[in-house]
Image (spheres, rainbow, N blue to C red):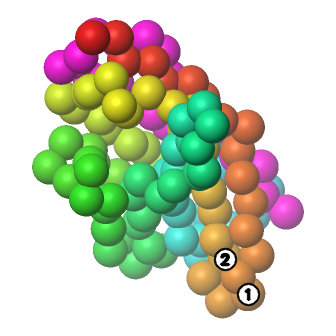
Amino acid sequence: QVQLVESGGGLVQAGGSLRLSCAASGSIFSIYNMGWYRQAPGKQRDIVAHISSGGITNYADSVKGRFTISRDNAKNTVYLQMNSLKPEDTAVYYCNALHRTWGTTYWGQGTQVTVSS
């Protein structure tokens, strides 16, 4: 069982930055692939960025060059640095953990990010 707690969301003006954090507990963090997803009102939940247990990263095209995902296994935490934010980045951002072998997945409760124009 893994518990995920996101933090760092808020209201920011377009062009600004935010850093999201996701603290994990309850299992061995390093064996999980981690991801950030987002869901805007009335839309499906989409992947934003992903980092494997080995540190390989992937990004949605819409955030490439603006967002950076990273992880600190010593702190059981994954981060999402978001720069040059746009109003279309407004959504609830969710942290996800995926066991690299068994495929078991866990979700955080989400954190709201609102970008004003």
Element marked by disc 1: loop
Q: Is residue 56 above or below residue 114?
A: below
| Circles 1 and 2 in contact, beta carbons < 8 Å | yes
How many residues crowd around disc 1 within 10 Å: few (fewer than 14), some, or many (20 or more)? few
Task: Return the residue nearer the eye: 32 or 28.
Answer: 32
Q: In which quarter of the image is residue 60?
A: bottom left
Q: Residue 52 in the image: x percent, y percent?
A: 44, 73
Q: Residue at x 63, y 62 (%)?
A: 97
Q: In which quarter of the image is residue 5?
A: top right
Q: In this view, does 61 lie to the left or right of 105?
A: left
Quarter of the figure with the C terminus: top left
Q: Mark 1: which amino acid?
A: Trp
Please name the residue that numbered disc 2 is placed on: 99
Q: In this view, does 81 lie to the left or right of 48?
A: left
Task: Return the residue nearer the eye: 88 or 64.
Answer: 88
Q: Is residue 88 visible?
A: yes
Q: Residue at x 60, y 32 (%)?
A: 41
Magenta run includes residue 4: yes
Q: Is residue 106 above or below residue 21?
A: below
Please name the residue that numbered disc 1 is placed on: 102
Task: Return the residue nearer the eye: 115 or 19.
Answer: 115
Q: Give the range drawn in magenta.
A: 1-21
Numbered circles on residues, count:
2
Magenta run includes residue 55: no
Task: Return the residue nearer the eye: 43 or 66.
Answer: 43
Quarter of the figure with the N terminus: bottom right
